[in-house]
Structures are given as structure tokens and as C-alpha cells.
Amino acid sequence: MSAPDTRRRPASGRTRRNTSLRSLVGATALLVRRRASRDAPLLVGWIALLCLATVLAVAVPRLVLDAVDRGAREAVAEAGPTADIIVRAQVGDPNVASDFATLPAIVDLAATVPGNLPDGLARVTDTPTVSAISPGVRMTRAEAVAGAARIEAQFGLLGPDQQSGLTLVDGRLPAGTGDGDRVEVVVSSEAADVAALAVGTVLNASVPVADPDEPPTVVAAEVVGIVASAHPSSATVCASEWCDLPTMWAPEVDKSRLGGSGVELTLLVDAEGIAVAQQLFFDPFVASVRLPLRAERFSGELVTTVIAETDALEANAAPLTAGSGVTVNVRTDFADALRGYGDRAAAAVAQMTLMIAGLFGAVAAVMLVVGGLIVRRRSADLALERARGSSLGGVAVGGLAESLVLAVVGAGLGLGIAALVTPGPLADPLPLAAVGVVAVLALPVRAMLLAREAWSGRRQPANRRDRQQLVARSRIRRLVLELSVILLAVAALASLRSRGLVAARTDGTDPLLAAAPLLLAAAVTLVVLRVQPPVVRGIGAVAARSRGAVGVLAAAHATRAVAVLPLLALTIAVALVVGGSLLVQTVREGQVDASWQRIGADARATGVFGAGVAEGVRAAPGVSAASAQLVTRAVGFDSGAASTQGTLIAVDPGFADVARLLPARLAPDSAALDDLATASADFEALPVLVDERLAARVDIDELVMVFGEDRVPVRVVATFEGGPGGYLSGPIAYADLGALGERLGKLPPADTLLVMGDGAAAAAASTDATELVTRARWLADRRDQELVQGVERMTQLSVAAVALLAAVALVTTVAGGGRSRSRSLSLLRTLGVRRGFGWVLALAELAPLVVAALVGGAAAGVAIFVASGPALGLRILTGGTGDPVLRVDPATVVLVVAGSVVLCAIAIVADVVAHRRDRPGEVLRVGETT
């Protein structure tokens, strides 16, 4: 009897598949639970980091969008009624002209216009108001009043919209027209005071006739009421129902007419009165359906939409009148009023994008650093799994399952917190998607790479020359990779600089602007990694010569301390802090410079100022200097062969004191002004100072100034650069006010007053100025703009977040080397070294990393700020005439260095506390600590 066949049968296909599947997912749930239980503190930290990253990924783009939206609302509010949509039609007899419409047809049209608006305008417009106004007509009083002004009146519609905005002061509202030649009207209290009108006053006007022999028909307008506005308006702000009746609350007085003054005013009549008043005019009334814009309904995106829709309606208003048969035209100054908003918003978004790029670059780098620590702590487990037959795919599946659970928990918490902090839709999915990818893949990919390195091994040629060739090839590959990153960074910066702000986005992340700082930080990191080792080895050689073993071990730890990811994370953090500080400081100081450029002094008043006004202002408390000036625009400068126009500023002797207190280039220097004062009394030709632009356009040796109808020979005493170009158009020329009066035969009155000092505003306000602007008010208004505030808030948030991330990176870096330091310290303690020297080893590891990050980050922060200057639109937010000068605040250097020292101290203390219970014998016997 033969022995049974004990050979193993070939495995079936199903068995092989089951074996492969077990190698992938076998005991995955058990391994995940055991690791999570053992590494609970690390995983809690990982979840907290994911939560923070998710909050930032959701909240930061939302804050950017909110800043843009608030800026849009602010811009629309500043535009006021000038941005309203006005639908105009001509009111008259349709039988006379086909484009005339009746007043009832206009009222019906107003009810249908909101439903015919495009979607964007429909979202931001308020209830329309209807008004109508006639051409002007001369009115005479039925009973003459001595000294009363002559009246030029317009008839305006007193409809429901107007009645709701009135308060009756005297009399009553129109109740009817009486006969066909009489209307009842009401006037404003302002018009009644100026024109000497009262209840019962009758004003007559003659109906125009074609035949001069035909007896004229007179229409009588009886004042039955005097009214006041329920919502007082000003010259710049009006209620929507009154904006198209300009002289209703501000009657215009003309005192230049022969035979006395005249007044232009508005008489309000009801709809029946409009029909009677129409016979006074050949020309039609103008009816306006005004659609007020609600600033609080706007967003940055809607501004662009509304501009496009208003442009389309101005070109073709037919969609608004569908089916009504009324001929209308649409007019609005919305696009002009918000013309500069797009550039301001793009500049603000560009500056915030610079901060966001650094922030999320730091987030990703820190997540990779922390993920690397978690995986390295499990290196023994991964080696054991591989020894028991687990494949690399199985390692990846286990890590992926765990990371998915952690990502769901961390992202869920982050989304909940973000919904509470910044409610609203997701503004930009890109940052959240990037955080999600890193959160899911960081752990399994690092685990798979570590497992492969531990088991794959590397075959080395036996021949030494072959080994040298392999090393050389490896170095070349690294060099090519590093050069590629550096070239990409240079190309991104060059493209960004050449592109400028024009292509910047306001509706999300600008990829180029986001990539440039990260590429630059990566390039700087690679350069630092090349430069740092020789420096550390040199310092380590000195430390190794110190007495005892501590210096030797510290030098050994220092030479292997700097890794790519921790250095990249800290470099990005330092670059963001430095760049953010430079950004805020440059913008704020640029706004100060711009305030001088736009105002020209601490206070600038315009009006008509007599000879003694400037002296009185100089004597006022808190005034350092004051100057009265005559500013004349469009003055001709003719040298025969060439001519040009410029602005002449005739100054009094006090301007020299004002100029000494002004920043450079805002006025001629003291020497030039002294030469002007001296020459004004010595030459027949008028001595002047001219700027370089004027000197380049004409021959300054033979120059004549065309001042009105006078031709005044001038002598150029000196030229200067700069001048008050922030509020006056150039080129600029200066002359002495008294000398100009002598050459002209009369002394023109000054029309501008510049005042310097803390009391400048109060002193200038005490004069009869028609307009007063102060530098402090301009600066405060500029800094209070929503877009400027948004940039500052984003910078502060980014710096705070990146400081926290830097602390996490340092603590993680220290924790990653904890086992090695613990073994080294245990060896030192066997040689008699005290326990307290553990912080020396931690410092030896951290110091090269932190110093390298400080140097590289500072260089990257300054470089990205300088290189991307045109793409940041700094001039737009500062409000100056040119790009602001880069300002480096010494406090920034102190802050960054001090912050780095504090973070190092925190990381070292955390490491000392974590290893305070280590026992040398146990560490040396087991080989590692927890």
C-alpha cells in the first residue's frame, strides 16, 4: 500500500484573492483601535490641528469675501443718490410728439419698472419714486413787493412720494385747480424766505402765443401752503423724492442781474395743476422715475453685475417699458461713482491673498510635520506588520482608514466652529479641499514610505567607483530639483510683477499670487539647507572643544537637527510675520504721506481771504505757520517756440515757514523760496519757481506768463521737484503774491489758506472758508475704509494663527528628537552629568532650525513684498500719488526675534516636562521612551 500524497495542492484563484485581501485589510479595525488607544494624546492633537486647519480654510475666505462686500456697500453709500437709476420721459401731449407721454402713463410705468429690471438691479433697488418738473418760467407778483427778488420758477409734481416727505408749516396743501387758468401751489420755507412769499401770494405767468397780436392768457399760481422737509437734505445728500427737484429746498439766488437779484425756485402743484401749468411752455415737462439703490444689499460680485446691467440699459432702455409704449432713457452715474472700487477691491484681495498663501502653506507644512511624528512613533509597529506578511498596500489601507476617521472628526468639528464664527456659504472651496487632501493622505503615505524604506533595502555596487557615480547622480538629481524650484519661484515672481494688479481676482484665490510666496519660501528653504550645514559644523567644532561630554553631544545633535519640513514650516511662518508687518507698516505710513499729498498742510481752507486773515490765523493758539495763496489754474506759459499750461500758486511770505514743516518734495526747499523772496523785489520780470515738468516743456530763459488777458514776463529763479500734485494738477509754478499784484496793477485776493500745527483745524474753521479739509480727518477716513480694515484684520489673524502653528511645529520637532536626546542624556548621567542638562541638547537641536528659519523667513518676507509690489496695489489703498516707500519697523525685528525665543522656550519646557520621569537604566535597557 503506497503512502498518501502529501503534496500541497495549488491554491485556487479565490484562495489567492482572499489571501491578497487579508494582506490588505486583515485586522485593520483591530490595529486601528489599538494604535488609537495607545497614541491617544497624539491623535487628539492631530484632530485639534485638523479642526484649526478646517476653521481657517472655511473662515478665512469668508472673511475676505465679507471685507470685499463691506467695501462695496461703503462705496455705494458714498456714491449716494448720484448712483441711483433714473428713468426719464417727456411729459406732454402725445398728439404733439410721439415721444411725449401723459403723466398717468408715467405713474403706471413706475409701477411696472421694478418687475422689468434685470436680476442684479432687482436685488439692490428700492421702491421707485416719481417726480416731474417743468422748464423755467418768469413769474410776476400780482401785488408788487418793494425790494423783492425776481422769480424764475419751475413747476414740480406734488405726488404721493412728495407728500410723504413734507411737513406743513403754514396753510394747506393744494385741494384743486379752481378754473383752467389758476393753480394752487406750495413752496418750501427756504424759498418763501428768499423770495418773500407767504400764504395767499399770487404769482402770474403769461401763456406764450404764436401770434403777437393775440392777447396773452395769464396763469395765476396761488401759494396756499408753506412746507418743510420731513427728512432734511443737504447739498450732497437728498431724499430720493427730491433729488430731481433741485431748487425745492435750495433756491438759487443770482445777484449779478441788472436791476436787482433773482431767485430760482420750485412751486409744487398736484397732477391737475400740472395739466394747467403745461400751457405755459412749448417744451415738455421732464418726468423721472428714480430707483434708489440700497447699499446694504450690495456685494462685491453685485457691483460688477450692476455696472454691466446699467450700461446695457443706458444703451437700450426698451426692456423697462415693455408693453407701455412710453419712450424713456436711462441715466445713472453708478459706473462712474464706483469706477475706482474695482481697483481698490483687487488691491485689498491681492494683499490678503499674500497673507492667506503664507497661512495655508504653514498649515500644510505643520500638518506634514505632525503627521511625520505620528508615523515615526509607529515605526516599530510598521516593521512588525511587514515581518508578519503585511503588504505595502495593507499598510496604506490601514493608515487610510484611520486618517479618514480622524479627518471626518476633525473636519466636522472645524466646520461646526466655522459655521458659528463666520456663518454663510463656502466662499472658496480650494483651501478646504487642500486641507482635506493633506488630512487624508498625510498619515498613510508617510506610513507606506517608512515601511518601504525599512524593508526594501538598497543594493550597493561592490566597486567603489560605481558607488561614487551613484552618489554623484543622486547629488545631480537633487541639484536639478532644487534649481527647478528656484527657477519656478523666480518665474512666478517675474510674472506677478509684470502682470501687476489688473488681472487680480476679487471672487476667490488668485493662483499665481498664492503660489509665488510659497515657491519663494521653498526656494529660500533649499538655499538655507545648502548653506546651513557648514556653518553649524563650524560652530559645532568649537562647542566640541569644550570641557565635558555635553558639548560633544550637543554639537552632534545640532549637525543633524535641520529637516526640510520643519524648516519650511518655520520659514513660511517667519516670512508671513515679516511680510505682514511690512505690508501694514508700509500702508499706514504711506497713508500718512498721502494725507500730506492730498491736503498739503494740517488744514487747507478755500474761499476769499483778505490781507489780514493769514496774520490772524498765525496768531491763533496751536498754529505753527500759515500761508495765504492765490491758486490759478490753466495759466499759460509761452516761450515763443513752445507753450504749455500749468497752475500758478502765488504765495505770501508765510509760505516759507509752512514749507519748512512739510515733508520733502511737497514744496520747494527753503533756499529756493529765499531766492524767490529776494528776487521778487529786484527784477522787473516776475520771479517764479517752476517744477521740472514745466522746465522740460518750455524755454525757461525767455518765458512769458499768460494770466487772464495779461502777458507777464517772468524770470525763472530756480526749478524744483515735486509740489502739491496730490490736490492740484501740474505743472506747477510759484510766485510771490505781492509781486504778482504789482505786475498786474492790482492785488488779487487769496483763495487758499494752508495752516500748520495742532490748532490748524480750529484756526482755519474760524475764517469765512467755503470749504475746509484737514489732514487728520482725511487720514482717519482713509484708515476707516472697510477694505483697509479688512487687510489689517486679515494680517492680524494670519500672524496670530501662524504663531500658533509655529509653536506646534517647534514642539513637534522637539518631540520628534525626544527619544534620541533621552538616550544621550541617560548616557551622560552614567558619566555623572546632572539631569538638568537635557535642555542643552534640546536647544542644540532647535537653535540651528530657528536661526535658519529667521534668516530665511526674513529674506523671503522682504523679497516677496518687494518683488510683488505692483501686484499688491499699495498706492490704491494708501491714496497717494505714487507707490509708498517700503517701511521696515525696527519693532518688527524685535518682535520676530523675541517671539522665536519665546516659542523655543515653550518647546524646550514641554520637552523637559515630557521626559522628567525618564530613568536612565530603563532607557538604556529598553532603548526608547514614550
Image (spheres, rainbow, N blue to C red):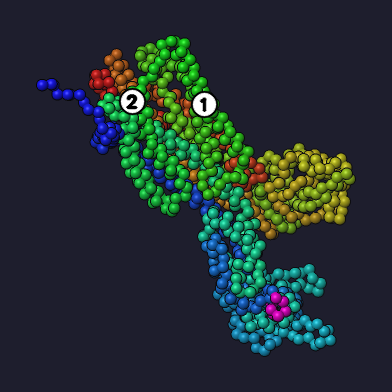
Quadrant of the rendered image containing residue 124: bottom right
Q: Image height check: is 225 above or below 734?
A: below
Quadrant of the rendered image containing residue 148: bottom right
- Name the residue: 44% across, 47% down: 59
Q: Nearer the viewer, residue 704 or 34?
A: 34
Q: Are marks 1 and 2 in contact (CB under 8 Å)?
A: no
Image-based side of 147 in relation to 425, left or right? right
Figure label count: 2
Give neighbour class at mark 2: few <14, some 14-19, many 20+ (Cα, 10 Å). Answer: many
Image-based side of 804 in relation to 888, left or right? left
What's drawn in magenta, residue-wise?
92-98
Magenta portion: prevailing SS class: loop
Q: Position of residue 263 (x, y in %)?
A: 72, 73
User: For the residue marked with disc 2, what is the amino acid?
Assistant: Gly
Q: Earlier in the sequence, mark 1 or mark 2?
A: 1
Image-based side of 103 in relation to 572, left or right? right
